[in-house]
Image (tube, rainbow, N blue to C red):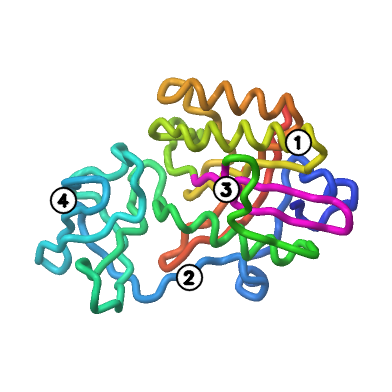
């Protein structure tokens, strides 16, 4: 799952300290960019529950679907500028999906929880694997991606990061027992000879690394440390947040 570097690095699911994948124009040719359909602007008002928000659009209040069930409490503040994707399904109760929010100290943050897997799948298709299979069942979990290259077998779990504090990304922003379980499964698979990694897709610009959010979920931090000890690689996928999408721009491996 490595980025067009040495064969050894490719087989090891690792990357050198920092790799520029491609320039902006090449992304659209190689397909690392998630593109939304029609995007409009609005102002966030409130979030009655995890699934919906109230947003002002052209002076009218709209109930919109929030494409992230995490807390996002440091982002979704009253008056915050947001981006909405217009949905053309007439059977939906809501016409818009809230996909990005503007954080004054940082810029635009993509909060679409489906975006990381979509951009990573596009990326993996360019990395020379003989097989890329999403939603792979291993043990008692579904791992995001299973890949094969010759006789070598790979597994990759993807996590989207939207929480930033003082220039550092943190995951998770809410306790995730599922995330802990995935890390345990990856550690087990690594010990059985699979090349395993967890990739944190950083859904904002200006952030180059992610650390476990120990204050919010210490068990996740412990599981991540155990997974790394077992041989699981940790990758940071840096992104550019575009007005109508998300694009991977760089990849880093957590070395220390």
Marks 2 and 4 close (CB-CB < 8 Å): no
The tally of labels here is: 4
The stretch drawn in magenta includes residue 119 = no
Q: Considering only order in the chain, which callout, 2 or 1, is on the residue closer to the N terminus?
A: 2
* Residue 121 picture location, percent across and down: 62, 61
Q: Residue at x 69, y 41 (%)?
A: 197
Q: Which mark is residue 142?
A: 3
- Identify whether 124 is placed above or below 109: below
Gap in Å between the C-alphas at discs 3 and 2? Answer: 26 Å
Q: Which residues are magenta?
A: 141-160
- Identify the residue at the far left of this view: 60
Mark 2 surroundings within 10 Å by alpha-carbon count, few (fewer than 14), some (14 through 19), many (20 or more): some
* Residue 181 picture location, percent across and down: 55, 34
Mark 3 surroundings within 10 Å by alpha-carbon count, few (fewer than 14), some (14 through 19), many (20 or more): some
Q: Secondary structure at mark 1?
A: helix
In the image: residue 141, left or right of residue 78: right
Gap in Å between the C-alphas at discs 3 and 4? Answer: 36 Å
Q: Which residue is mark 4?
A: 45
Q: Secondary structure at mark 2?
A: strand
Q: Which residue is mark 2?
A: 35
Magenta-colored segment: predominant secondary structure? strand
Q: Which residue is mark 1?
A: 190
- Identify whether 40 is placed above or below 226: below
- Identify the residue at the far front of this view: 140
Q: Which mark is residue 93?
A: none
Marks 3 and 4 close (CB-CB < 8 Å): no
């Amino acid at each position: 799952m490595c980025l067009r570097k040495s064969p050894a690095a490719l087989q090891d699911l690792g990357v050198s300290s920092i790799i520029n994948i491609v320039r902006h124009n090449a992304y659209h040719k190689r397909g690392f960019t998630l593109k939304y359909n029609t995007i409009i602007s609005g102002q966030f008002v409130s979030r009655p529950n995890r699934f919906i928000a109230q947003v002002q659009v052209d002076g009218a209040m709209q109930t919109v679907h929030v494409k992230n069930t995490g807390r996002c409490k440091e982002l979704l503040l009253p008056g915050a500028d947001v981006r909405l994707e217009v949905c053309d399904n007439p059977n939906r109760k809501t016409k818009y999906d809230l996909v990005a929010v503007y954080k004054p100290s940082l810029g635009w943050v993509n909060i679409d929880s489906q975006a990381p897997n979509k951009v990573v799948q596009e990326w993996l298709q360019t990395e020379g694997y003989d097989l890329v299979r999403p939603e792979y069942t291993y043990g008692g979990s579904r791992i995001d991606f299973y890949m094969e290259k010759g006789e070598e077998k790979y597994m990759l779990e993807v996590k989207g990061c939207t929480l930033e504090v003082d220039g550092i990304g943190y995951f998770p922003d809410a306790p995730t027992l599922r995330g802990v379980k995935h890390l345990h499964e990856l550690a087990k698979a690594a010990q059985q000879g699979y090349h395993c990694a967890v990739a944190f897709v950083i859904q904002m610009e200006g952030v180059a690394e992610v650390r476990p959010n120990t204050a919010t979920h210490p068990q996740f931090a412990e599981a991540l440390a155990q997974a790394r000890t077992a041989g699981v690689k940790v990758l940071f996928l840096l992104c550019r947040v575009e007005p109508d999408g998300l694009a991977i721009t760089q990849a880093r491996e957590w070395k220390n």
